[in-house]
Image (spheres, grey):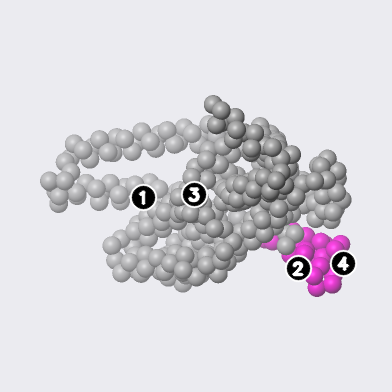
Amino acid sequence: MQALRDWFTNAFSNPQVVLLSLLLLLGFAVIYMMGDILAPVLASVVIAYLLEGLVGMAERNNLPRLPAVLIVFTAFVALLLFILLALLPLVMQQSVELIQQFPVMISKGQDALMRLPANYPNFISPEQLQELFAQARENLIELGQTLLSSSASSVIGVLTAIIYLVLVPLMVFFFLKDKEAIVRWVTRFLPKERSLVNGVWQDVDGQIGNYVRGKFWEVAILLVVSFVTFSLMGLNYALLLGVLIGLSVIVPYVGATLVTIPVIVVGYFQWGWSEPFFYIMIAYGVIQSLDGVLLVPLLFSEVVNLHPVAIVIAILVFGGLWGLWGVFFAIPLATLVQAVLHAWPNMNELVLMENR
């Protein structure tokens, strides 16, 4: 008990350490308890933070801040309109078409499975196959009931999306335009001596900013490359699969594994065990390999120095706390934790040196 008391006294003997701890606890508590309510604000802050790099680049080229903000914000709105009016309708159309093909796919899958007991009697029996079909039917019924129950709240979801589409761009503009005034207002409530907080923020700011921007380009590049490749090879639902492959990199390791399933399913039910199917698999493997060998080192070189185990743990922890948002920001949040852990002992050493 005395050792724990000594550690606590040593760890929190510096007021700056206490300030950093309070800020972290307050931030986590606000997001955990009010994340749903403040979702438009949090989304606006993230988007503004992402666009701030482009605004800063324009300012470094001697362009005043207001014109730089207007140019970057106009490009953001144009990209948003393209996604909503051009990309999203096509993705939704292909999603509906794929769902309509589910009965045909299930029928073909049953035919293929029914041949397994005759071809491999030592591995599977007709009784086991019937149990498998029964379990699959129960899962499909549960899925259908879930979709029906969720459709009742679809109107509220549409209204919420419309509100987001109005509020988020508006707040993004003002966050960019009045960045300095907002930062000054926030820092008024902080002590003047906050070198530890500033040091942690500078460390995290560079890494998270580069990570988020790099992740945006990784998603865009994989989406375009996958869509073009699948389209040229004649694969059905090429745009939908390209979007899924692009978004899969948001969740490292897990996303790439999950998105492989729809690629295999679509390719198999379109061509079966034939040469086009294996060519598609080879092309998909090449795309994933280029992402790991070329894109990731190029976009994220020395940006996020986290062990793969730490990344998986961060996805599980923050995803469990905040759902999809937690999964998306798992690596930035893990980077924040890493920066705090690195700065904490260094600050304690400085305190001991000052006491001497």
Q: Is residue 355 left or right of residue 137?
A: right
Question: What's the CA distance linking mark 4 and mark 3?
Answer: 41 Å
Q: Which residues are magenta?
A: 54-82
Residue 246 pos. (x, y %):
53, 59
> Could you tell me if the residues under marks 2 and 4 are in contact, i.e. CB atoms within 8 Å?
no
Residue designated by label 3? 310
**In this orientation, which residue lies closer to the viewer: 258 or 27?**
27
Q: Is residue 119 magenta?
A: no
> Could you tell me if the residues under marks 2 and 1 are in contact, i.e. CB atoms within 8 Å?
no
Of circles 2 and 3, the one toward us is 3
Question: Could you tell which of marks 2 and 3 lies nearer the N-terminus?
Answer: 2
Q: Secondary structure at mark 4?
A: loop
Q: Amino acid at mark 3?
A: Ala
Of circles 4 and 1, the one toward us is 4
Residue designated by label 1? 104
Residue designated by label 4? 64
Q: Which mark is residue 57?
A: 2
**In this orientation, which residue lies closer to the viewer: 134 or 257?**
257
Q: Amino acid at mark 4?
A: Pro
| Residue that sits furthest to the top in the current view | 1
Residue count near mark 4 (Cα–Cα under 10 Å), binned few <14, some 14–19, many ≥20: few
Q: Residue at x 82, y 53 (%)?
A: 179
Quarter-wise, where is residue 259 in the image? bottom left
Q: Residue at x 21, y 46 (%)?
A: 114
Q: Residue at x 27, y 38 (%)?
A: 132
